[in-house]
């Protein structure tokens, strides 16, 4: 009896000369290197690739961590941070920027100067102040520098409740959004992953104090490493594709929740979002 014919699936197909390649927008990302691959720049790269963007990477810090704990970190020289960014800007058009771990006022100043030279480019600020495992990821002057230099330039800032408290002295989402708006932030997404609520509730303040959009997501069991990085990078990706702020945030929230729902445990510690799930499912 002849065996049934096998289906052949091609992951890479030659493109027709009549179909020009789709433009891939580049996103300039600033953040720390997490050797576990769970958070930081590694998370940003995976997210941007999954969402059809090209990552342009500026390293701000080297961390010593795994999925169980943060052991230590070393900040890079701010001049080296600025030089990395300048080399990339000289080479490629930038469709969006995203910042994560910055660590010091001097690095914040370097990043702020870089994005000031890109006034029409949307900037997503993930105000990383602590690691998921509780370790602090910045010097004493970091919060003041973020408030004075970078947050006023942000198209979107994505603090969780703990970061709201550190940045504005309040964990109340409405009051925190008002305080961030007073600094000049264009839009604020207060994330609910750290709040003690049955479901995760995110609140998007567009032109804070004017429009508030609330979205509610089932809380998933487990402790996850790098979900905040994933969300901010996804928002930057969708903005780079030209989406409106509200659409970019909604699509980023959906992508992040699906990534966390598919999370896996590469080590002995926290689970890591499966960020490449859109690529894997297209290629099945």
Image: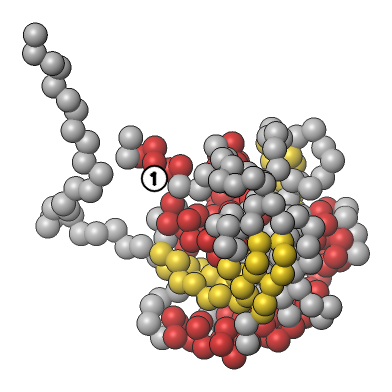
- Label 1, secondary structure: give it: helix
Question: Horizontal placement of 129 versus 48: left or right?
Answer: right
On the question of residue 273 being in view, the answer is no
Q: Which color scheme does this rendered protein use?
A: secondary structure
x, y percent for residue 244: 54, 56
Q: Residue at x 62, y 82 (%)?
A: 76
Q: Report the quarter where the N terminus lies.
A: top left
Residue positioned most to the left: 2
Q: Evaluate whether residue 162 shows in this view.
A: yes
Q: Which residue is mark 1?
A: 279
What residue is at 29 percent from the left and 58 percent from the top?
A: 22
Pick the residue in front: 51 or 44.
44
Q: Residue furthest bottom?
A: 79
The residue sitting at 67% across, 46% down in the picture is 269
Q: Residue at x 73, y 50 (%)?
A: 191
Badge 1: few (under 14), some or many (20 or more) residues near its Cα, within 10 Å?
few
Residue 106, percent from left and from top: 70, 86
**Among all residues in the image, which is located at the extreme top?**
1
């Amino acid at each position: 009896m002849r065996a049934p014919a096998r289906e052949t699936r091609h992951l890479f197909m030659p493109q027709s000369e009549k179909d020009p390649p789709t433009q891939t927008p580049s996103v300039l990302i600033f953040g720390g290197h997490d050797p576990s691959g769970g958070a930081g720049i590694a998370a940003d790269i995976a997210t941007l690739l999954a969402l059809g963007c090209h990552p342009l990477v500026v390293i701000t810090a080297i961390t010593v961590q795994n999925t169980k704990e943060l052991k230590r970190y070393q900040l890079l020289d701010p001049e080296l941070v600025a030089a990395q960014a300048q080399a990339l800007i000289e080479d490629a058009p930038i469709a969006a920027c995203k910042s994560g771990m910055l660590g010091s006022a001097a690095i914040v100043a370097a990043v702020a100067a870089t994005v000031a030279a890109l006034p029409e480019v949307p900037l997503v600020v993930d105000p990383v102040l602590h690691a998921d495992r509780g370790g602090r990821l910045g010097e004493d002057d970091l919060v003041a520098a973020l408030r004075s230099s970078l947050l006023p330039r942000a198209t979107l800032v994505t603090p969780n409740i703990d970061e709201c408290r550190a940045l504005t002295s309040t964990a109340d989402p409405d009051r925190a959004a008002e305080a961030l708006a007073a600094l000049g932030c264009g839009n604020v997404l207060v994330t609910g992953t750290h709040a003690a609520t049955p479901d995760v509730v995110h609140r998007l303040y567009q032109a804070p104090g004017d429009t508030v959009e609330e979205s509610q997501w089932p809380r998933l069991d487990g402790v996850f490493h790098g979900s905040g990085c994933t969300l901010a990078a996804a928002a930057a990706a969708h903005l780079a594709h030209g989406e409106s702020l509200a659409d970019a945030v909604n699509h980023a929230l959906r992508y992040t929740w699906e990534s966390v729902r598919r999370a896996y445990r590469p080590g002995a510690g926290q689970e890591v979002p499966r960020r490449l799930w859109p690529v894997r499912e297209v290629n099945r």
